[in-house]
Image (cartoon, rainbow, N blue to C red):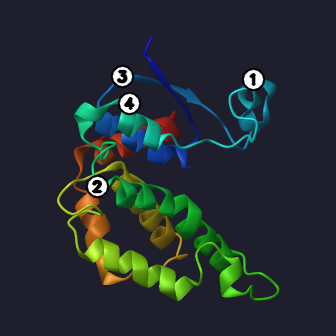
């Protein structure tokens, strides 16, 4: 039995973790959850995650398996920037996408939103990915898994603009063998 278990519902945020697991190269088991059948609301899964969501564990995986070089280690001056980008996806990009997909009745004040405003957010992300080839320059990290997954998802579902910088960045990420393996495994799971 593998040391790691992925509670997985594809496609969902757990696909980000599957890509990360493929990047670290450690064996892992998959416990498939059917969101449509409510597996994520069953008592045994709620004991794992009381929110009933399929969580992302990228920070833990990057730090726990340093030989994969997907983190910026504690003590490195770049760690703060790395952590900013690692959490930027779920704390800024995702909420902005949801606000675009499901508009509010009244436009909230910019200062009330963690991401400020959509256009500024898109410009900040554009400036980050254009410096590349990765968020942290030459080093591919877990931040690329998170940010890249968010951009790919957002463009696929037309919740984010298909800026040329985003297309170039996600195109570079699409060349990663681990992403190809994760996507192939999800296709197998969907076909089963």
Residue at image location 50% in from the left, 57% down from the top: 87
The numbered mark, 3 or 4, whose residue comes first in the sequence reads 3
State the residue lying farthest toward the top: 1
Q: Earlier in the sequence, mark 3 or mark 1?
A: 3
Secondary structure at numbered mark 3: loop
Mark 3 is surrounded, within 10 Å at the Cα level, by few (under 14), some (14 to 19) or many (20 or more) other residues, namely few
Marks 2 and 3, how far apart in space? 31 Å
Q: Residue 169, located in which quarter of the rendered image? A: bottom left
Q: Earlier in the sequence, mark 1 or mark 2?
A: 1
Residue 171 in percent (x, y) is at 26, 66
For residue 44, the mark is: 1
Q: Secondary structure at mark 4?
A: helix
Residue drawn at x 46%, y 48% is 16
In the image, which is nearer the foreground, mark 1 or mark 2? 2
Q: Are marks 1 and 2 in contact (CB under 8 Å)?
A: no
Please give the label number shown on residue 27: 3
Can the viewer see residue 140?
A: yes
Measured as percent of width and height from the top left, residue 90 is found at: 55, 59
Q: Give percent across and percent down for residue 8.
A: 56, 36
């Amino acid at each position: 039995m593998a040391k790691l278990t992925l509670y997985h519902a594809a496609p969902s945020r757990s696909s980000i973790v599957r890509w990360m697991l493929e990047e670290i190269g450690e064996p892992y088991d998959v416990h498939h959850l059917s969101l449509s059948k409510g597996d994520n609301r069953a008592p045994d899964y709620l004991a794992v995650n009381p929110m009933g969501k399929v969580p992302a564990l990228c920070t833990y995986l990057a730090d726990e398996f340093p030989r994969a070089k997907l983190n910026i280690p504690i003590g490195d001056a770049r760690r703060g920037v790395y952590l900013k980008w690692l959490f930027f996806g779920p704390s800024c990009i995702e909420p902005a996408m949801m606000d675009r997909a499901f508009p509010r009745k009244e436009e909230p004040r910019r200062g009330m939103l963690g991401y400020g405003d959509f256009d500024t957010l898109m410009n900040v992300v554009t400036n980050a990915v254009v410096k590349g080839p990765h968020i942290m320059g030459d080093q591919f990290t877990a931040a690329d898994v998170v940010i890249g997954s968010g951009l790919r998802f957002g463009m696929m579902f037309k919740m984010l603009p298909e800026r040329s910088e985003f297309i170039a960045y996600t195109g570079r990420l699409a060349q990663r063998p681990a992403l190809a393996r994760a996507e192939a495994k999800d296709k197998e799971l969907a076909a089963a």
